[in-house]
Image (cartoon, rainbow, N blue to C red):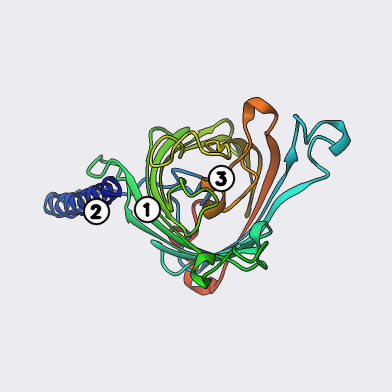
Amino acid sequence: MNKIKYLLISFSLFALHAQAQEADSLLKALDSGDVATTVDAAFKSTHVVLSHSSETQKKHDLDLRIRHHFGDIGGRFGSAHTLYGLDVASDLFIGLDYGVSDRLTVAVGRSKQDELYNFSGKYRLLRQKTNESMPINMTLFAQMGWVAREPLNDSEFAKYSDRFSYFFQSIISRKLSSRLSLQVMPALLMRRAPDDTRDPENLFSVGFAGRMKITKRLSFIADYTVVNGLSRPKDLTQAYYNPFGVGLEIETGGHIFSLNFMNSEYIVENNFIPNTKKSWSKGGVRFGFTISRNFTLFKSKNEDPDKKSKIY
């Protein structure tokens, strides 16, 4: 627990230091008459495969997102008798993300697994600059999950607070070129009453993600989250695996459509970080897709092209 406290303190100090550097660089740029512009669209969408990206919604933009994970392609629960997983829906999600400002996004959603409702906020603290006065993007993400389903037994959800989990993440990204963007995502998940008493209630994780642009409207995306072996033992009764996903992201005007393959049965961080029980090497890969439709509300306020969303 002390390690987690030290890490959180370190992230906070880094954020304050970076913000101070950005303010100092801006003052110097103003003095010289050369104001740097921001680097837009490190990622094309607010999500990668499983994880969030550093992007936020533009002010007054509303994103309707539908995500679907099917069953195992191979292994014991896959193959032809389930049409390689297409007969089985392991999780289904529908959610709305709204841009309160260009930097702040609030969201609400609901997934099939555990009848989980999620409420989140996402704030872009730092933005990458073209003149390298700020070399990275940093976005802070916080999410609360609420399990709405009935308990499976009398001992489950002994306290009503056991239904809640909390996820905190710092997303640090950089657009290396017009085609390649990378990000790292340290995070902390806080939950109650895990199934195994040796499994910590607070899980620290580190995620990695990237996007490689193939054509004007097609990109390769991937993300991987390290959970086991950090604050979590590797020898628990139930075998857990690190979530890993790859996909193709297709832009079609106001839509973002992605075709994904991942080992996680679940969609929301509060579920897929602690509960991924499938392995790529044992046929636990599944197909999934995401449909994202962006709507610009209050159009009269977005007549300026610079105010329109540049991630769609």
Instruction: Identify the residue under disc 2.
Output: 12
Precedes in sequence: disc 3 or disc 1: 3
Which numbered disc, 3 or 1, marks the residue closer to the eye? 3
User: Which of 3 and 10 lies nearest the eye of the viewer?
Assistant: 3
Query: Pointers 1 and 2 in contact (CB under 8 A)?
Result: no
Badge 2 density bin: few <14, some 14–19, many ≥20, Cα 10 Å: few
Whole-percent x and y of residue 120?
Answer: 48, 64
Give the Cα distance between marks 1 and 2: 12 Å
Which residue: 68% across, 33% down? 284
Label whose residue precedes the other's in the sequence (2 or 3):
2
* 231 vs 306, nearest the viewer: 231
Q: Earlier in the sequence, mark 1 or mark 2?
A: 2
Label 2 residue SS: helix
Q: Looking at numbered disc 3 in the image, what kind of residue is underneath it?
A: Leu
Residue 184 image offset from top left, x and y in percent: 39, 40
Q: Which mark is residue 139?
A: 1
Q: Element at badge 3?
A: loop
Quick check: 71 left or right of 87?
A: left
Neighbour tally class for label 1: few under 14, some 14-19, many 20 plus, Cα within 10 Å: many
- When asked about the image quadrant of residue 198, the answer is top left
Residue sitting at 20 percent across and 54 percent down?
A: 16
Residue 32 horizontal/vertical position (percent): 13, 49
State the CA–CA distance, disc 3 to disc 1.
Answer: 17 Å
